[in-house]
Image (cartoon, rainbow, N blue to C red):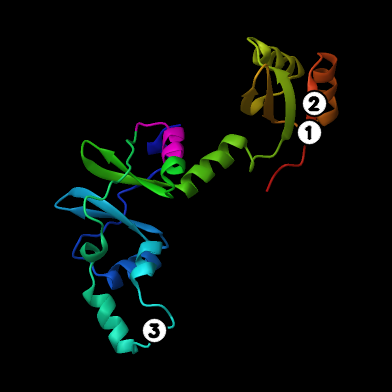
Amino acid sequence: MLVRSRMTPNPITVSKKTTIAEALELIKDNKIRRLPVVDRGKLIGIVTDRDLSQVSPSPATTLSVFELNYLLAKTTIGDILPRNQKVVTVSPDDYLEKAALLMRENAVGGIPVMEQGQLVGIITESDIFDAFIEIMGVRQPGLRIHLEVENRVGVLAEISQIMKDLGVNITHTVFSPAGDKGSLLLKQDTFDEEMVLKALKEAGFEVVAANSDVIY
């Protein structure tokens, strides 16, 4: 799955001259958490709702409403943006797992997407969560089976053949290896739990759990 299939294209941006008040309004009105900062068509940074909150007066301030609004209207993104801020980016043709890894390693919740030096999108942790939900088939009705299998060549082919013989379609598959063993999760377009479990056990496969009512 590529980044381009999950990113938000043409994200809302700000410039160094955008005021804190304007940036806060953009975040609130568009229900977003981060704003790429662009100067003369070049990405120079990114600010988050947390960044803006940290430079805004606290509720305990003794400033009047007039003074508070004046301060927010006077302070710009350029005033708070770190010099030479390093911005982690990805390409729309990068795999989604690369974006997830970069978010994890850099402790960020969103990454600008760049193509030929131009900002074309943004990918966030919410996009990664949505992709994970789709990959796991959480919202699709059917039978979910958790197997512990040998980590060897052909094991997936054997299980696929069993399902084929039963006339059952495997809609989602996730395998997590752990040495010479592994956890295999299957989502199938059937609710006949008894039939599927019987066939797997007869073939010598160890079923850890099964649930034919996994839909949210």
Sequence-wise, the earlier of marks 2 and 3 is: 3
Helix, strand or loop at mark 1: strand
Which span is picked out in magenta?
Answer: 93-102
**Discs 2, 3 touching: Cβ within 8 Å:** no
Residue located beneath label 3 in the image: 61
Residue located beneath label 1 in the image: 210
Picture disc at residue 145 = none
Residue 168 placement: quadrant? top right
* Residue occupying the point 42% across, 63% down: 31
Residue located beneath label 2 in the image: 207
Q: Is residue 174 above or below residue 105?
A: above
Q: Position of residue 198 (x, y in %)?
A: 85, 21
Q: Is residue 145 above or below residue 110?
A: above
Q: Is residue 132 magenta?
A: no
Label 2 crowding class (10 Å Cα cut-off): few <14, some 14-19, many 20+? some
Label 1 crowding class (10 Å Cα cut-off): few <14, some 14-19, many 20+? some
Disc 1 or disc 2, which is closer to the eye?
2
Helix, strand or loop at mark 3: loop
Residue type highlighted by circle 3:
Thr
**Discs 1, 2 touching: Cβ within 8 Å:** yes
Residue type highlighted by circle 2:
Val
Q: Position of residue 156 (x, y in %)?
A: 65, 16
From the viewer's side, name the closer residue of 120 and 43: 43
- Mark 2 and mark 3: span between their CA atoms? 60 Å
